[in-house]
């Protein structure tokens, strides 16, 4: 296993970061593997996988580059640069870091990720440019059209993690973040089940970067460390929560979608992020649902969480049973 020594100061100063490049890279990994982790991702893959495979078939050199870069246990480091932590950067600015990678650095990274000597076809100087061009295509064609909704899901995940942190501390917030990661005690954070030397993070900047595809990795650069992790399954699969037509007719589309999303307790801010509705609109819907005894609320730290009552659950169950 691999673990990081994370002291209290580093953990206290850690932060969540939104990275469009990480979202594009996670989407590239999903396209390359071609398997869906949840229904919405299956719909997305069905829409974009044929075009991705056609592009790779037309450019076999880049296809070979991607296979070498996305290794079984490690990604080519130049392909997954660690965020700067200076707020959300524009995708183009993040991509520049890949495009400007020295060719010899890219070849060295690919040797590590592929686990052996590079094929002669990859011993060339334009590998960073090719990787950047592919990621730009993935972003423009397969991510950007969905980015407003994906960003809301990411923001909702951050809110949920922050709530977990306030209720159960870092152990609770970290343990289900990514497969193979858990708190070991004595300031040790296991980040992966694969063996690699431990790293000391005292004085470093630690970032957690959520993405919507079910992909995950860790990266570091100088004094910056990042854990890229998938948004929780509940959030990742509720961007377009199905609302039964009779329920839509009864409550109205916007209010019904709020009720459907309350399968697990959520704050008003989370509901705003997930539905795309305004804060005032969500507040009015919750007030009516509270008055109808379809939802209840409880305080959790500084947040107020809303959840369905037995009556609300019965209403949803009646829709599902027809």
Image (cartoon, helix red, strand yellow):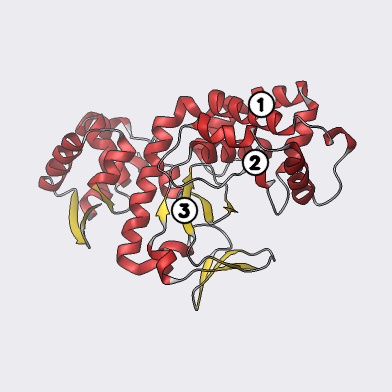
| Tag shown at residue 79 | 2
**Front-most of residues 302 and 119:** 119
Split into 4 quadrants, where in the image is the C terminus? top left
Q: Residue furthest right?
A: 120
> Horizontal placement of 187 versus 192: left or right?
left
Split into 4 quadrants, where in the image is the N terminus? bottom right
Q: Which residue is identified by label 3?
A: 208
> Horizontal placement of 67 versus 46: left or right?
right
**Front-most of residues 19 and 145:** 19
For mark 3, give the secondary structure: strand
Label 1: few (<14), some or many (≥20) within 10 Å? many
> Horizontal placement of 90 versus 317: left or right?
right
Residue depicted at x 45% and y 51%: 232
Residue depicted at x 32% and y 53%: 264
Q: Residue furthest bottom?
A: 186
Q: Position of residue 151 (x, y in %)?
A: 40, 37
Residue depicted at x 42% and y 39%: 88
Q: Which residue is identified by label 1?
A: 52
Task: Please tell me which of labels 3 and 2 falls first in the chain.
Answer: 2
For mark 1, give the secondary structure: helix
Label 2: few (<14), some or many (≥20) within 10 Å? many
**Marks 3 and 1, Cα distance to the nearest angstrom?**
28 Å
The vertical placement of 73 against 174, above or below, is: above
Q: Position of residue 37 (x, y in %)?
A: 56, 44
Label 3: few (<14), some or many (≥20) within 10 Å? many
Q: Are marks 1 and 2 in contact (CB under 8 Å)?
A: no
**Marks 1 and 2, Cα distance to the nearest angstrom?**
18 Å
Q: Residue furthest left?
A: 291
């Amino acid at each position: 296993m691999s673990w990081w020594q994370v002291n209290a100061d580093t953990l206290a100063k850690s932060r969540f970061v939104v990275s469009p490049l990480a979202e594009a890279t996670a989407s590239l990994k999903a396209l390359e593997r071609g398997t869906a982790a949840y229904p919405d991702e299956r719909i997305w893959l069905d829409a974009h996988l044929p075009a991705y495979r056609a592009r790779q078939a037309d450019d076999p050199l880049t296809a070979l580059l991607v296979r070498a870069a996305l290794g079984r246990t490690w990604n080519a480091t130049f392909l997954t640069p660690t965020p700067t932590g200076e707020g959300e950067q524009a995708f183009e600015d993040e991509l520049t870091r890949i495009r400007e990678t020295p060719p010899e650095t890219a070849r060295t990274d690919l040797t590590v990720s592929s686990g052996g000597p590079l094929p002669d076809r990859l011993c060339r100087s334009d590998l960073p440019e090719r990787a950047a061009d592919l990621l730009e295509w993935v972003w423009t064609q397969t991510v950007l059209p969905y980015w407003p909704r994906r960003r809301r899901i990411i923001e909702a995940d951050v809110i949920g993690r922050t709530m977990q942190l306030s209720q159960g501390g870092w152990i609770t917030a970290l343990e289900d973040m990514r497969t193979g990661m858990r708190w070991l005690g004595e300031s040790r954070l296991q980040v992966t089940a694969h063996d690699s030397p431990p790293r000391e993070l005292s004085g470093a900047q630690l970032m957690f970067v959520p993405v919507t595809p079910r992909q995950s990795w860790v990266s570091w650069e100088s004094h910056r460390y990042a854990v890229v992790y998938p948004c929780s399954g509940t959030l990742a699969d509720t961007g377009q929560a199905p609302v039964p037509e009779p329920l839509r007719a009864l409550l109205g589309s916007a209010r019904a979608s709020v009720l459907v999303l309350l399968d697990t307790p959520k704050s008003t801010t989370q509901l705003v992020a997930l539905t795309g509705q305004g804060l005032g609109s969500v507040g009015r819907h919750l007030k009516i649902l509270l008055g109808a005894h379809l939802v209840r609320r409880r305080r959790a730290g500084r947040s107020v969480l809303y959840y369905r009552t037995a009556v609300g659950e019965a209403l949803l169950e009646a829709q599902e049973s027809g």
